[in-house]
Image: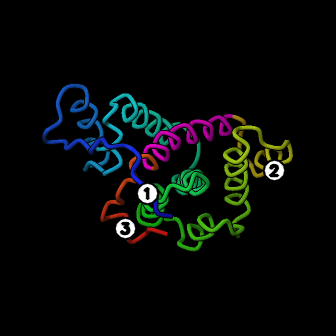
Amino acid sequence: MSREKMLTLEGINHASASGRSKEVLDTALAQVGFIPNMYANMVNQSAVLDMYLHGYALFREESGFTPPEQEVVFLTISHENNCEYCVAAHSMLAVMKSGVAKDVVASVCTGEPLADARLSALETFTRAMVKTRGNPARADLDAFLAAGYTEQQVLSIVLAISVKVLSNYSNHLFNTEIDGMFAPFKR
């Protein structure tokens, strides 16, 4: 899906950044080793990138989900929000860093059912949370809990949705160019 760039702001280069933007980009660089195009755009309002980095790290550290489960959550949210950038980035992270099978990534990105019952329950519940804006049917919640997930993990999904709203919506407004390392995973 091609989008029009809505904002006229340009991405902020780490080398020329100053003040609060430089501090937040320094944090980003320490976390991921480079400044993705998404971060360069988001730091135009440093609080947006700062909140994203903080929430993202907390989700990774405290969600109670395994790395593959985390990628299913992030991919599902990004797919539902039609964010090409984040779908490409999390597809790459899923396959290259978290060991998620390519067919699982493809299924999440096409909305096809997942063969793994536990991952399917996670994907289905996450999708329901996004589609209903946090008002899932009781049956969706019950199926998620029956798959062995916890009520605390429901709140972790709320955190992930919050983080992805920051990135997905920013990417929509900027029509963020997908970084070269993510480009092979563009859908």
Whichever of callouts 3 and 2 sits on the residue coming sooner in the sequence is 2
At a point 57% along the width and 57% down the height, the residue shown is 79
Who is closer to the viewer here, 93 or 9? 9
**Relative to residue 117, is residue 104 drawn left or right?**
left
Q: Which residues are magenta?
A: 152-171
**C-alpha span from label 1 to label 3:** 9 Å
Q: Residue furthest top?
A: 19
Compared to 105, does 127 lie above or below?
above
Q: Element under label 2? A: helix
Q: Main secondary structure of the magenta part?
A: helix
Residue 87 appears in the figure? yes
Which residue bears the numbered disc 3?
183
Number of numbered discs overlaid on the protein picture: 3
Residue type (three-letter) at the residue carrying disc 2: Ala
Who is closer to the viewer here, 33 or 18? 18
At a point 54% along the width and 57% down the height, the residue shown is 68
At a point 43% along the width and 69% down the height, the residue shown is 185
Which residue bears the numbered disc 2?
143
Which residue bears the numbered disc 1?
85
Residue type (three-letter) at the residue carrying disc 3: Ala
